[in-house]
């Protein structure tokens, strides 16, 4: 098993699927950040690196897409559920687009986000 497989397995074991919404919800450790609850896990991204805390949706996105996230990017929950790990419902985008997505979910209406994926409203 590769090191990244270990992280992917951890994410899978600590989540469950909501079929009606397609969300895969994190049921492990959480943290509240600015009034929003996010899944959190402490791990290292390489065998020799130091352990640090990661939001689980960001880890899921990075593992699935074999990429890292820059400090200027966010991983948005298109479904509006901050505990969702389903990579099909996550999108890499600038903070400004992420803020518009939160507005869409608050008003249950999405008018699109230019070159980025539309929100998924249930």
Image (cartoon, grey):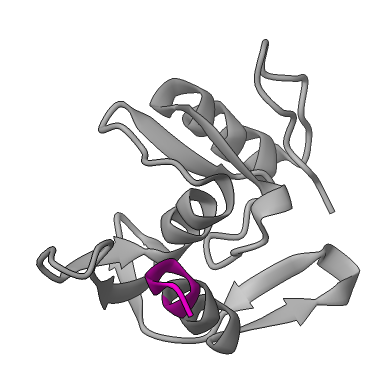
Q: Is residue 116 left or right of residue 111?
A: left
Residue 108, image quadrant:
top right
Q: Position of residue 120 (x, y in %)?
A: 78, 43
**In the foreground, 75 or 122:** 75
Would residue 2 be counted in the magenta stretch? Answer: yes
Residue at 75%, 78% (x, y): give it.
Answer: 17
**Residue closest to the far top:** 114
Q: Is residue 67 left or right of residue 113?
A: left
**In the foreground, 26 or 43:** 43
**In the foreground, 87 or 31:** 87
Label total for image: 0
Residue at 61%, 60% (x, y): give it.
Answer: 81
- The C terminus lies in quadrant: bottom right
Q: Position of residue 51 (x, y in %)?
A: 15, 71
**In the foreground, 115 or 12:** 12
Residue 79 seen in render: no
**Residue closest to the far front:** 1
Instruction: Classify 100 as above or below 81.
Output: above
Q: Which residues are magenta?
A: 1-6
Q: Is residue 38 left or right of residue 16?
A: left
| Secondary structure that dominates the magenta span | helix
Residue at 28%, 62% (x, y): give it.
Answer: 45
């Amino acid at each position: 098993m590769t090191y990244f497989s270990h992280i992917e397995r951890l994410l899978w074991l600590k989540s469950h699927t909501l079929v009606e919404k397609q969300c895969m919800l994190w049921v492990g450790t959480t943290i509240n950040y600015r009034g929003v609850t996010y899944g959190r896990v402490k791990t290292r991204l390489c065998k020799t690196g130091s352990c640090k805390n990661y939001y689980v949706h960001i880890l899921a996105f990075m593992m699935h897409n074999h990429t890292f996230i820059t400090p200027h990017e966010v991983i948005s929950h298109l479904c509006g559920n901050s505990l969702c790990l389903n990579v099909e419902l996550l999108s890499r985008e600038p903070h400004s687009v992420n803020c518009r997505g939160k507005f869409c979910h608050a008003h249950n209406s999405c008018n699109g986000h230019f070159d980025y994926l539309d929100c998924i409203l249930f």
